[in-house]
């Protein structure tokens, strides 16, 4: 699912949050969106998903203007994955994932056998099918995040927009979630995810989009644009980007210098 953004701007009242953003995301890319708090990452995602009115500029999803999609039609091509939070209701994992299939149903329709199979396939795709009958509030934070991802897969959308999917997760669960996301892009999904960790982008993302003061600071292949100078510019903190040799090959990482 290719995404093209042309001259995108957005304001909350008199406060300009996004200012003239233009970039193109290729089909099947994993894009890490970096930048300090308050630079417009979540606002950008809401514009992409049609959740905010009065976005100026043009957004093309699969070559078609986003505004040309009816809400139900848009839900069939783009899915939002929020941060994991304490569940309000004690649904089972399978029931939670089934909720993602409702975008394909009519107003008074209920999920049937086909929707159940799609939900079960989403769980298998992420390797968490054994959690199907567990209560969502009785599993770990990392498992909950994978369940939210499975719910998006059950929606059958090929564009996944993720707002800090590794927030509040321990180190191991962060890596498991990110590894699962990489596997999805290998299967043809396009993913945009926000993160506060440049190391996540260096390790997993093929492309990086960085925002500063509502403007596009850089966009391109991670190996080309994510430099120590850019990290310092974004976060006002000096780092060195080093390459470490590991059992699986060379890996780049950020090393603080202050």
Image (tube, rainbow, N blue to C red):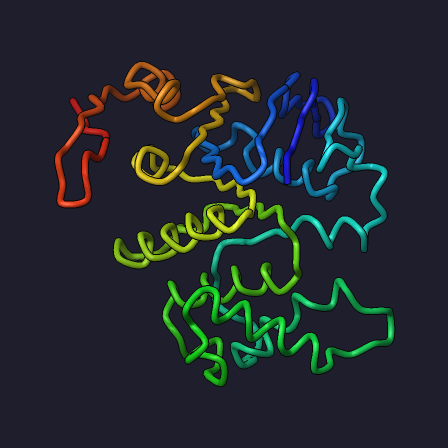
Apparent side of residue 155 relative to residue 203 in the rendered image (left or right) = right
Q: Residue at x 66, y 21 (%)?
A: 16
Apparent side of residue 182 relative to residue 248 in the rendered image (left or right) = right
Above or below 79: residue 245:
above
Q: Nearer the viewer, residue 249 or 191?
A: 249
Q: Nearer the viewer, residue 78 or 85?
A: 78
Q: Position of residue 74 (x, y in %)?
A: 76, 48
Please identify the quadrant where the C terminus is shown.
top left
Q: Residue at x 71, y 37 (%)?
A: 62
Q: Residue at x 60, y 78 (%)?
A: 95
Above or below 241: residue 85:
below
Above or below 258: residue 143:
below
Q: Position of residue 55 (x, y in %)?
A: 76, 29
Apparent side of residue 207 relative to residue 8 in the rendered image (left or right) = left
Q: Quadrant of residue 240?
A: top left
Q: Nearer the viewer, residue 233 or 179?
A: 179
Above or below 61: residue 161:
below
Please identify the quadrant where the N terminus is shown.
top right
Q: Residue at the far front: name it.
A: 187
Q: Quadrant of residue 76?
A: bottom right
Q: Position of residue 152 (x, y in %)?
A: 59, 59
């Amino acid at each position: 699912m290719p995404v093209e953004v042309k001259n995108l701007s957005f304001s909350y009242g008199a406060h300009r949050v996004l200012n003239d953003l233009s970039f193109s995301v290729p089909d099947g890319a994993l894009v890490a969106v970096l930048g300090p708090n308050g630079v417009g990452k979540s606002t950008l995602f809401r514009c992409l998903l049609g959740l905010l009115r009065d976005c100026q500029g043009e957004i093309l999803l699969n070559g078609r203007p986003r505004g040309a999609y009816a809400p139900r039609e848009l839900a069939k091509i783009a899915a939002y994955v929020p941060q994991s939070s304490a569940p309000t209701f004690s649904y089972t994992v399978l029931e939670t994932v089934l909720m993602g299939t409702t975008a394909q149903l009519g107003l008074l329709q209920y999920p049937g056998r086909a929707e159940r199979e799609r939900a079960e396939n989403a769980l298998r795709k992420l390797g968490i099918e054994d959690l199907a009958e567990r209560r969502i509030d009785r599993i770990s934070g990392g498992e909950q995040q994978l369940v939210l991802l499975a719910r998006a897969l059950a929606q059958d959308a090929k564009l996944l927009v993720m707002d800090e999917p590794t927030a509040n997760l321990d180190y191991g669960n962060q890596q498991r979630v990110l590894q699962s996301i990489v596997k999805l892009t290998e299967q043809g999904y396009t993913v945009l995810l926000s993160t506060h960790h440049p190391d996540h982008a260096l390790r997993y993302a093929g492309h990086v989009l960085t925002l500063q003061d509502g403007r596009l600071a850089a966009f391109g292949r991670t190996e080309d644009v994510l430099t120590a100078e850019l990290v310092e510019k974004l976060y006002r903190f000096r780092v060195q980007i080093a390459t470490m040799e590991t059992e699986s090959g060379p890996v780049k990482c950020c090393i603080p210098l202050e």
